[in-house]
Structure formats: C-alpha cells, structure tokens
Amino acid sequence: MTHPVIDAATIGVHQVTMPIPFPLKEVHAYLIDTGGEWVMMDAGFPSEDALAVLKPAVERICGGPARVHTAFISHYHPDHCGLAGWLQAAGARIIVHERDWPSVERMGSDAPFNPEEYGGSPFAAIAAEADFSFEQMRQETQRARFPLKRPHLVQGGETITVGGRSFELIWTPGHTEGHLCVLDRATNTIFTGDHMLARITPHIGMWRDNGESPLHRYEESLALIELIAPSRALPAHEVPIEDVPERARELRRHHQERRQDVLDVMSPQTRPAPDIAKDVFSGRGGGMQTFLALSETLAHLNALVIEGLVVQEEGEVTGFYRLA
C-alpha cells in the first residue's frame, strides 16, 4: 500500500509504517522533530517484524532511540503500544491516558486473559458469543514482548513541551475509554490514532460495564475535534485527513445512520442482541469480525436505550431488546 508523502521539511514529521497481523495490515507511527529532541506518536505492534522496521527508521531519522524524549500512546490496543517498552528502555518518557493504562498493564502481564477485568460481564459475553479468543491474541502479543513499566499517566487537557514544540493532549473517548489525540499547535496538525481514519469508520464498541455510553462519548469527541478544526490529521492507519472538520461530521452522520439501521431490524417483540447484530452486519466473518459486529451493535443499542427509542429487557448478559 502506498501513502501520500508527508512534507517533513515543512512540518517536521516523519511517518514510519509497520506491519500488523490484523486486516488493516499496517500501522503508522510518527517521529516529530522538536529541535534536537524527538517525540513519537504511537509505537507499533510487539513483533520482531515491526521492530525490524522501527529500529532502523529511528536510527536513520533520529540518530537512535535514545534521542526519542517522549512517546505518546493513543490507546491500549497492541498495534499502538506494543513497542513502547523498547522506547522506554532507551530512556523515552511514555505517556498514556489513565483510563487505558490498566488495559495496557494487563496486556503485558503473564496472567491468563480475564475478560471480566477488561469490560465486565458484557465484554465476556460478547467474546463468548463470537467464539473469539482474546487469550490467543494476548499470547500472540507476548511472542516479542517488550515490558513497559508504569508510564506517565495523563487525563487529557495537559500541554507537554519538548524542545521547541508544544503538544496539547486531547482526551477523545470512543474507540477506547482512554483514547488520546495529540495536537501540535505549531503546525495545527492533530495525530488522531484510531479516533478518526480517512476512509473507514473506527470501531466503537462497549467498554467496561460502568454505565457510560461509548457511542455518545465518541460523538462528543468528534464534535470537539470539529470545533478545534486542525489543518490536517495524521491517523494511525490509512492516509492523512485533509478536511478534518468535514471528516468529523461524516463520522457523526455514519453513526446516526447506523442507529437507524439498528432500529430498522427491530420491532415491539424482543430480540437477542446477537440476532440484531447478524441482521445489521450481514456477511461478516466469524471470530474477531463477529466480536466487533456484536460489540458495535451493543454500543448502538446502549445509545438508543439512553435516547428512549429502545427498551432493554431482562435476560442474557448481552441483552434482549425491543422498540420503545
């Protein structure tokens, strides 16, 4: 896959594209020149293949990992935080949102996967329904693990200055509970992780069983990015986003349409959530794709319940739902 060239001479940003064992195939990290010291956005997947790309890139661009002062991790998924421990071992300060750190920490432990610790009962039920093994995924990420000690935890709203460049940390919950975007005010460039992608819609599923609506939080986060109106967005997958406010509006419209898709397959009679998901996401494969479809359907059902359009009945953990 080819990607538009970022004019590093203009904005001082170098893209490093690494392989990942997921359908998107690639993930981008970004090295940012702050005038002698370097900042990195995201840290790739914990594999030897990814390190074989990242290590020489850091040597060539920065002069070695010891020159990386700070690495911002957008969220806890392994294709974004996987090589943070390698950078930390060379002296980099690693920055993670406090709400995502528990998941990063568990992912790097040797303890067997416990879905109850990640997302509570709904998360466990979704994984079981989809016949998807997160324990197998955890073991895959352990093959080339680089231990990450406790990083610098943030809440969002902080400004981090490195060298001659300041970065504003923006808490953008949705894709994960503790997702961070990073705004470089000097060039009005925002690094969006998986919060916004140019062509596909980021997955918005259920978080922990804590009463929050991931979809509503995501839409609020999109509205915030639209208000900030960066000149460009550099996401972790695909290509740069040139019209950031318009892309934020497109993503919000998509989820309004997805709500309607869910309502269109419902009736006054109760239906289990997995059946609704199969109708809304027909043609999806099994395993991880089934998990993602069910998780996203539950996030939309959760939002519709809060909006008073759908009623959740007592039943299985994943729930029975009907039109209000």
Image (cartoon, rainbow, N blue to C red):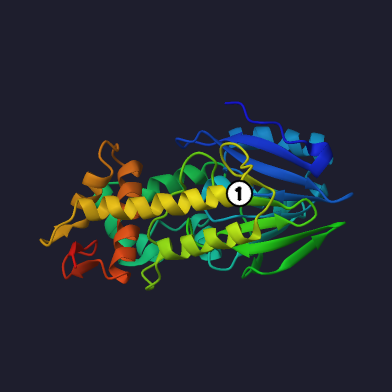
The residue nearer to you, when weighing 186 against 36, is 186
The residue positioned farthest toward the top in the image shown? 1
Q: Position of residue 321 (x, y in %)?
A: 19, 63
Q: Position of residue 87 (x, y in %)?
A: 71, 50
Residue at 38% in and 63% down: 119
Residue at 19% in and 68% down: 324
Image quadrant in which you'd find residue 204: bottom left
199 is higher (above) or lower (below) than 252: above
- SS state under label 1: helix
The residue nearer to you, when weighing 193 against 257, is 257
Q: Position of residue 250 (x, y in %)?
A: 48, 48
Is residue 32 visible in the rendered structure shown here?
Answer: yes
Is residue 177 visible in the rendered structure shown here?
Answer: no
214 is higher (above) or lower (below) than 285: below
239 is higher (above) or lower (below) than 205: above
Quadrant assignment for the N terminus: top right
The residue positioned farthest toward the left in the image shown? 269
Image quadrant in which you'd find residue 5: top right
Q: Residues within 10 Å of mark 1 (few under 14, many from 20)?
A: many
Under mark 1, the amino acid is Val
Q: Which residue is mark 1?
A: 244
Q: Position of residue 172 (x, y in %)?
A: 55, 61
Q: Is residue 174 left or right of residue 166?
A: left
Q: How many marks?
A: 1
Residue at 16% in and 67% down: 315
